[in-house]
Image (cartoon, grey):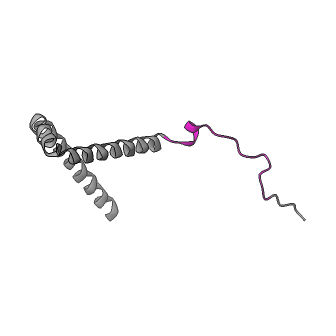
Amino acid sequence: MAKIILSNKEGKVPRTFFEGSSFFRMLRFSFLVFLSFFLVYVYYLHLTGNLKKTILTIWSNHQQIIIAFSIFITYTVIIFQLGVWRGRRR
């Protein structure tokens, strides 16, 4: 009869942190950390009563940039969604 080897006797080769993680995982982690800090900051502004004043100040100083960025994001999402719908039909 043939011998069946069920385990790897050589063992696993230890990997470093950067070998085990990809760029997109680190990017996602960074985004989630940024999002959590942003939510804590917004909550802090809400508790101190400065949230409305801060939002109005940002809107008045950066209105054109915010509108242009919103139009770009909306356009990109619409084009992507149309591509998804087209791809599913094929």
Residue 28: in magenta span? no
Side of 59 where 30 appears, left or right: right
Side of 52 where 81 appears, left or right: right
| Quadrant in the picture for residue 27 | top left
| Count of numbered circles on the image | 0
| Quadrant in the picture for residue 35 | top left
Residue name at image x 25 percent, y 45 percent = 42
**SS majority, magenta:** loop
Q: Position of residue 69 (x, y in %)?
A: 19, 41
Q: Position of residue 39 (x, y in %)?
A: 30, 47
| Front-lying residue, 64 or 51 | 51
Q: Quadrant of the N terminus?
A: bottom right
Residue 32, visible in the rendered structure? yes
Residue name at image x 29 percent, y 61 percent = 85
Residue 8: in magenta span? yes
Q: Position of residue 66 (x, y in %)?
A: 16, 40
Q: Residue furthest right?
A: 1
Residue name at image x 35 percent, y 41 percent = 34
Residue name at image x 28 percent, y 52 percent = 80
Side of 79 where 54 appears, left or right: left
Start and end of the magenta stretch?
A: 6-22
| Front-lying residue, 23 or 87 | 23
